[in-house]
Image: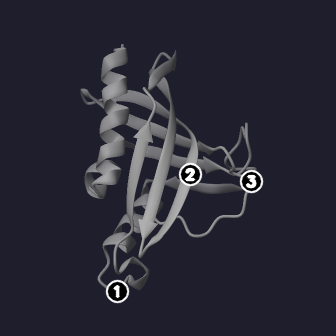
Amino acid sequence: MIADAEAIGFVLHEARLIDEQRFDEWLDLFTADGHYWMPLEPDQADPVLHNSLFYDDLLLLRIRVERLKGAKTYSQKPKSRCHHLLQQPMVENRTSEGCVTWTAFHYLETRMGEQAFFAGWSRHHLVRQEGRLRMHLKRVDLVNADSAFGSIQLFM
């Protein structure tokens, strides 16, 4: 069983890795079959049969991270930066494999004097593999997911 404090610590650590652009360490938090999902609509139940803002498996996430690190990625000169402000995460439910956390957040992404602000809720589907916690799914629901957005460069 995953203790509440361990799950909460995982969520806080995961946000810090993104904010500090420690993306390789962040990728290592996912299971091999893990996904990062940002639905397009509130209460969207299916990422495959409906459009999503993101529904990336580990391969696509690795490609995005390599693009962010690339020497010829001119859209990242200077690099984008971000900041998460999280409400206290809570364990929403438990499964036989692990648990699901729920966290309200504010997220700021900035580059070259431009700022984009987002608010929403994230759910981390956590499992224990090889003695450590990993994400099988990170779902990010934006308050205004059905709005038009500019480019989102980093990860919420």
C-beta proximity under 8 Å, tags 2 and 3: no
Q: Quadrant of the N terminus?
A: top left
Residue 138 vs residue 18: left or right? right
Q: Which mark's residue is nearer the viewer, 3 or 1?
A: 3
Q: Amino acid at mark 2?
A: Phe
Disc 3 crowd, CA 10 A, few/some/many (<14, 14-19, 20+):
few
Q: Secondary structure at mark 3?
A: loop
The residue that appears at 56% across and 69% down in the rendered structure is 151
Quarter of the image where one finds residue 78: bottom left
Q: Earlier in the sequence, mark 1 or mark 2?
A: 1
Q: Amino acid at mark 1?
A: Lys
Instruction: Decide which of 37, 12 is in the foreground and name it.
Output: 12
Disc 2 crowd, CA 10 A, few/some/many (<14, 14-19, 20+):
some
Q: Secondary structure at mark 2?
A: strand
Q: Amino acid at mark 3?
A: Asp
Where does the image place residue 115, in percent across and percent down from the top left?
Answer: 49, 65
The residue that appears at 43% across and 73% down in the rendered structure is 113
Q: On residue 118, which mark appears?
A: 2
The chosen color scheme is one colour
Q: Earlier in the sequence, mark 3 or mark 1?
A: 1
Where does the image place residue 16, in percent across and percent down from the top left?
Answer: 30, 45
The residue that appears at 38% across and 43% down in the rendered structure is 30
* Extreme residue toward the front, this view: 113
C-beta proximity under 8 Å, tags 1 and 2: no
Instruction: Decide which of 102, 51 is in the foreground and name it.
Output: 102
Alpha carbons under labels 2 and 3: distance apart: 12 Å
Residue 22 vs residue 113: left or right? left
Name the residue carrying label 1: 72
Name the residue carrying label 3: 146
Alpha carbons under labels 3 and 1: distance apart: 32 Å
